Structure formats: structure tokens, C-alpha cells
Amino acid sequence: MSFTIDRGLFKLDFTDHHAVLGIPVNADEKEVRKRYLKIARRLHPDSCKAGTEAEKKLANQLLSKLVNPAYEQLSQTSRDYIVSLGHMGRRLAVEKEKGKIPVASEAAKQLARAGASLDFAYKSAVQNIASKQYESLDQVSDKIAEISELNLVYLMLKGSKGESIKQEGKAGTTNPEPARSKPPSPPPKPEPQLDSTASRVPEYIRRAEGYMVKNNFASAVLELREALKLDQTNSNGHSLLGIAYLKQNQMAMAKVHLNKALQLNPRDERAIKAKQYLEKLIEKNGSTKPANSSKQPQSKPPENPSTSKGLFRNPFKKN
């Protein structure tokens, strides 16, 4: 199933990850994480309260094809993506002068008339729509489109004023200019920070293991992603993240992290076993797509990893 959204920033061939999560374009990492976790709990198969199998399937599709990729992008705090928002604002400002920025929602039209209270009006409008964004699954695409129209208007008005988008809690902007009058000061010595950072990685991994024991894989993914943001060469983190994705039947993501774990540590027995299990699932399903996204009925669904023997009974034992 594909989700087609042709309003707001999507209409300009820009994937609006902020609209998918229902957060302002200047949201910080903490807000991104908090919102993702809330949505994931609503849509994840283990906690979804949908009344029918069709609704549960739709919830899983929304999670795997829209929500997870959005969090994947925004949790990385990619400078390129943030800078692209600034470029988009300037582009929209030019289009505004030509009268080429149509919006359909009343909320976006009202925001365009907000004047001096733009920032407050924008944040309030986004929060109002986001509070109901994933309540009715068949209306999620429309809600995303409405929020994306708000984002479009906000970026357009900021761009027309020559203002950049400041991420909440940070002094940086979307289009910082390098200092020309004097060279930047030497960066502080990183050794103490590296020691502190390294000590935090095992904490994230331990919490992730606790979540996985309770079959709360969405929360485990959050913890493991935080660990890998601090240490991208942690084979244990990649191995566990691959298993967490595999348990959620997200085989493509599982394959990426299991391969990375084995690249970092070819003798990681847990990753080896998980990779072997993944290859069997792929062979059965004929692809790396989640099994429940297939349009063909499955007479014999692939074995759930949580019921398998050995590694998948306790994902934290290496042998």
C-alpha cells in the first residue's frame, strides 16, 4: 500500500517528515522522540486498539512506511534536511510573490493572516491537528496534508521576512553563514565528552534489552537508535536493533542493521543467527517487505520470531 499526499510541501516534491509526526518544523530532538513514541504505541501491532484486521494492517503500514522513516530522518538531526527547510522558505517566498501558493485548509488560510503572532498561531494550529492526527486511521493522510500546508505557509512567511527557522532549544538556524571577519575559535578538547558519551551507550542498550524482554520493540528501537547516534560502530547495538526490527516484521530495516553488525564484528553469533533466520523469512516471502503488507493471502504465515527457538526466545544471549 502506498500513501499519496499531494498538498502542502508534498506538492513541491518535498517529503514533509515533520507533518507525518505532527510536530512543528522547529521541533527539537526531545519533542521528535516523544511524539514518535506516542504514535508508535498507537500503531504498533502489539498495542494497537484497532477493531478490525484491516485497520490493524493499515496501522502497521502507516508505522512502517510513514512514521518510522520520518523518525529515522528527524532523529539524525541531519544538517542537510534542516538547511533544506531554509531553502524551501526562500523558494516559497518567491512563489508567494507570483501568487503560486494555493492552500486548501482553513487553518492554513488563517495562519497566512496571523501577522505578528505567527509563531504562536503556527504552533497552536499544528498541535490542534496533531492531537487528532492518528485517531481515525483512514483520515491520517488528510491530517498530514493539513499540517504540511501549515508548514508551507509558515516557511513561506518566514522566508518572505528573511528570517530563518530556529530549532527550539538551539541557537543555530537553518541557514547559518560562516564568519568572515575573524576565524572561529578552536574547538574545546573532546576527550572528556567522549568518555561521558561512551558511558551512556551501555545504559541505552540495557534499557532496550529490558523493553525487548517485555516485547515492547518500538521502545527498544528508540533506545537503540539513541545508542547508535552516540556510537555508530557498536556492533551489539546494530545486532539488537536488527532483531528489534525483525520482531516487528520490518525485514528491510532488520537486514540493514544485521549486515552492519556483521561488518563490524563478523563473529557476532547473535547477528549471525538472526541473519540466517531473516534469510529464511525472505526466502518464504520472496522479498524484504513486511509479510503483512502482501496483498496475497498467506496460507502459512512465516513463523513469528518471538516464538522461535534459541536466539529469538532470548535475543540477548550470544550463544
Image (cartoon, rainbow, N blue to C red):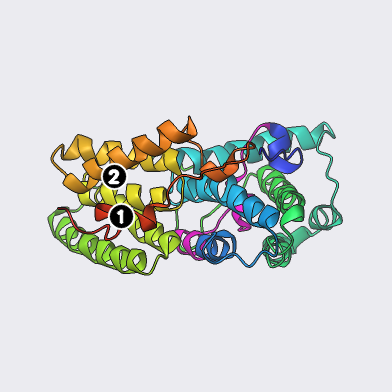
Residue in the foreground of this view, choosing between 130 and 268: 268
Residue in the foreground of this view, choosing between 122 and 268: 268
Q: Which residues are magenta?
A: 13-34
The amino acid type, in three-letter code, at marker 2 is Ala
Image side of residue 96 versus residue 24, left or right? right
The quadrant where residue 78 appears: top left
Q: At 72% from the left edge and 38% from the top edge, which residue is drawn? A: 4
Instruction: Please indicate, yes or no, whether residue 18 appears anywhere in the rendered image.
Output: no
> Could you tell me residue 249's position as x and y percent?
46, 47
The amino acid type, in three-letter code, at marker 1 is Phe
Tags 2 and 1 in contact by the CB under 8 Å rule?
Answer: yes
Does residue 237 sit above or below 278 in this rendering?
A: below
Does residue 113 sit above or below 281 in this rendering?
A: below
Circle on res. 312: 1
> Could you tell me residue 165's position as x and y percent?
57, 50
Image side of residue 261 versus residue 87, left or right? left
Is residue 32 in the magenta section? Answer: yes
Under tag 1, what secondary structure?
A: helix
Instruction: Please indicate, yes or no, whether residue 20 appears anywhere in the rendered image.
Output: yes
Is residue 84 in the magenta section? Answer: no
> Could you tell me residue 92's position as x and y percent?
71, 37
Image side of residue 74 versus residue 132, left or right? left
The quadrant where residue 10 appears: top right
Under tag 2, what secondary structure?
A: helix
Which residue is the site of mark 2?
A: 274
Q: At 44% from the left edge and 34% from the top edge, which residue is drawn? A: 284
Q: At 27% from the left edge and 57% from the top edge, which residue is drawn? A: 315
> Could you tell me residue 88's position as x and y percent?
63, 37
Within 10 Å of disc 1 (Cα), the crowding (few <14, some 14-19, many 20+) is: many
The quadrant where residue 280 appears: top left
Q: At 71% from the left edge and 44% from the top edge, which residue is drawn? A: 156
- C-alpha span from label 2 to label 1: 8 Å
